[in-house]
Amino acid sequence: MRNEVKCGVCPARINGAGKLVRCAIAACFFYAPLSLVASDDSRSTPISNVVLISIDTLRADHLGAYGYRKSVTPNLDQLAGEGIVFEHAYTPVPLTLPAHTSLLTGEYPPKNGVRDNGEALPASAPTLAERLRENGLHTAAFVGAFVLDRRFGLARGFENYWGDFQLFRYQGKDPGMIQIRGDRVEAAVEEWITAHRSERFFAFVHFYDLHGPYLLPEPWLSRFGEDVYDGELAYTDDLIGRLWKGLQKLGLADRTALIVTADHGEGLGDHGERHHGFFLYNSTINIPLIVRLPAGASGGTRVQNVARLTDIAPTVCSLLGVPLLPTFQGHSLMPEVEGKTLSPEPAYSETLYPYRHFHTAPLYAIQTEHYSFISAPRREVYDLNLDPKQTHNLALSSTGVANRLESDLKQIAGPQAPQATAQMSPEAMRALNSLGYVGSISGAGSPVDIAHLPDPKDRIRLFGRYQDALAMGNEGNLRSAIELEKIAKLDPALVNVQIDAGLARRSLHQEASALSHFKAAARADPSNALAHFHLGVSLSNLHRDREAMPEFLIATKLQPWFSQAYTAQGLAAARVQDMTFAKASFDRAIQLDPEDFDALLNRGKLLTMTSRWLDARQDLKRAVSLNPDSGAVHQALGTLDFYQGDLNSALEEYQRALKLNDSDASIHANVALLYERLGQPQKARAEFQRSLRLDPTNQEAIEGLRRIP
C-alpha cells in the first residue's frame, strides 16, 4: 500500500483490488470551507449536468486533499471532502493541448494524433462534446489560453466555445503566453450556466492561471510574494469556490456533478525540471482528480487504483446516462466508486517535446499501482511505495521488473519510435520538395532511429541554460541573443534555440542575422511551420517578398490553421502585385480568425485599391472596433474617404491617425496629398516636409515637393 494521505478528509478508501474501506474523518483545513450540503451515501440523486474543470499545470501534491501541508485551497479541499478523490491519476502527456485532447476524446495521443502543442485534432476523431450534444445536452467550453483555441479542433460539439484571444495584440509572443485571466473565465461560465439553468448541460472550464507567465492580481500577489505558484493556486481556488456558490444559488448543486482535474503538473525544480514537458516524473504527470456528485453522494471516498485522464470522458458519459463512444481508450470510473473489483490497468504517458524541440530521445512511461517505468536511452524504474519522489532508479538492480514493465509499455503504446516529422499532407510535401528540402524529409511520416540521440536527462542543464537565456530577454535582448547563439553552436539542430535566437536578433532590428537562424531552424526541421513562417517574415522585412512567399506557403500547408502565416502571405503577395492571391490569403486568415485585426486591415486596404469601397469599409470598421487606438486603421479609413471624395471625413480620420502616431511619415504624406487636393499648397508643403524629416526615402513626399513650388 502506498503512503497514506495525512492531511485532508478520508472517510473511505478503496484498496488496490477495488474494495471499499472505511476510516474516520479527519479535517485539517486552515481556511473557511465552502457551505456544502451533506448527503446519505445510500441515496441516489439524479444527475442532470456535469461541470468539468481543468486547472492547467496543477500538480496533485499542492492540494491539501493530497497531503500538502501548506494548503491554500480551502474550496477544493472541501469539495474533495464531500467528493471522491482518485489518489493516483495520471496524464498521458505533460503538454496543454495534447493532454486536453485526450481529456475531451478519451483517446491516447498516438491514437488521436495530437502529440504536441500547435497540432490539430483530425476531423475524423469523435469528441466527448459531440457525443453529449447528439444526446440532447447543451454544451459549452470556456478556455483560458490560446493553446486551446478552436482552430485546433477541440471546439467540435460545443455550441459555445468561449475564448477571445485577439492575436494581433501579441505579435512576436510565444503562443503559450497568450491567456485570459481566470476571473473573466469564471464570469463567462456563470453567465452561460445561468442562461441554461433549466436545461441539461455539460460545461468544460479551463483555468490557465497556474501556467506562466503569471498574472496574479491583488491581494494574492502581496499575500504570497515570491511564492507565485501557490498564489495562483489560491486565486484559482477562490474562483472555483465562487463558481460552486453560483451553482448553489441557482439550485443546481444537487443535480450537477462537478469534476476537477488538471492537464499536467509542474516540475518546480524536481529532477532539474522547472516547468513541464521535458520529463515524465510524477511532478508533471501525477494530477488531481476529484469528483463531487450531487448531494455529496459517496463523499469522502478515496480511490487508490490508478486512474487516467482518458477515463474522464467515459465517466462523464456514465454519469449522464449517455452511451460511451466505441473509440474511448479509457473506462468509466464509477464502478470503482461503487466498490466493484476491476482488473488494474496501468497509465500510459509520453512526451515527444524533448525530441521535437531539443534534439534528444523521446520518453514513454507507464504507471502501475506499485511502479513507475520510463523508457529512455537509460531506462528508469521506481518503486512508488518506497520512493514516491522517484530518486532511486532500480532499472539496473531490478532488471526483471524493468523488462516486464517495458513489455507492458510496448503492449499499450505499440512501436515507440517517433515519426521523422509530424504527419503532413501531400501538398506540404510538394511545397517542401520544391524548395529543396526533399533530402531532409524523404522519410517523413515513417519511424526513425533514435538510438543515437542523447537521453533527455543529459540535456536538462542545457535546457535550463536555454530557459535562462530566454529570461534575459526581459532585461536586454542583446544578452539573450548572444547566449542563445552560444547554445545553438553546441548543436545547430536545436530548432527552438535557433528560432528564439532569430527572434532576439529581430528585436534588435538585425534582420539579416535573424534570417540566418531561421534558415538553420528550417534546415534542422523542415516540418517546423514556425521556422518557415519566421524565415518568410525575415525575407519580407528585407524586401525579398518573392522569396518569402514560398516559405509562407509551406507554413500554411504544414499547419492549415496558422492564420498569421496566411496574413503574412497576403502582405507579401500584395507587395509583388499579386492581388488575387493576396485577397485569397486574407480571406483564409479571417475565416480562421474572424478577429484577425491585421488581416481585416490589410484586406480593407486592398479592397480600397480595387475600388470595392463598400466591402473595404466593412473590413476597416471591423478592424477599428477591435483596435480603436490603431493609427494605421484610421489612416486606412481616411484613404478610403479620400478615394470616395469625402475629403472632410478623410481629414478627420487622418487627424485621428496623427494623434495616435505622429511619427509615421506615411500619414503626414497622406495629409499633404489631401491638402494639395483641397488647394492648400502651403499646408501640403509643410506636411510633405514633416514626412521627409521622418523618412527621407518617402516617395510621395519627394514627388509632392517637386510639384509644389
Image (spheres, grey):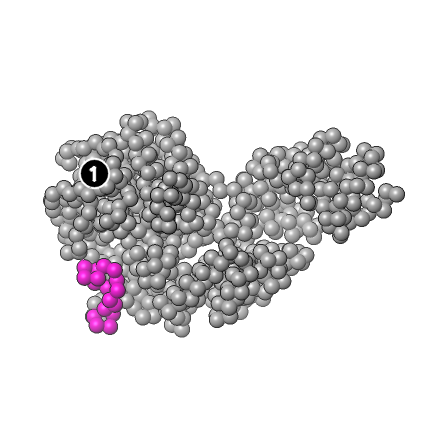
From the viewer's perspective, is 271 left or right of 78? right
In the picture shown, does residue 345 fall above or below 141? below
Q: Which residue is drawn at 45% across and 60% down?
A: 468
Any part of residue 37 in sight: yes
In the picture shown, does residue 520 fall above or below 165? below
Residue 622 location (% of width, % of height): 59, 35
Q: Please tell me in which quadrant of the rendered image residue 623 appears.
A: top right
Residue 679 location (% of width, % of height): 84, 34
Q: Quadrant of the C terminus?
A: top right
Q: Mark 1 points at which residue?
A: 82
Q: In which quarter of the image is the N terminus?
A: bottom left
From the viewer's perspective, is 16 left or right of 570? left
Residue 124 location (% of width, % of height): 41, 48
**The stretch drawn in magenta includes residue 667:** no
Q: Residue at x 39, y 30 (%)?
A: 191
Viewer-proximal residue among 457 and 214: 214
From the viewer's perspective, is 25 left or right of 333? left
Viewer-proximal residue among 448 and 134: 448
Which residue type carries mark 1? Answer: Glu
Residue 304 location (% of width, % of height): 19, 51
Give the extent of the magenta segment.
381-398
Viewer-proximal residue among 256 and 625: 625
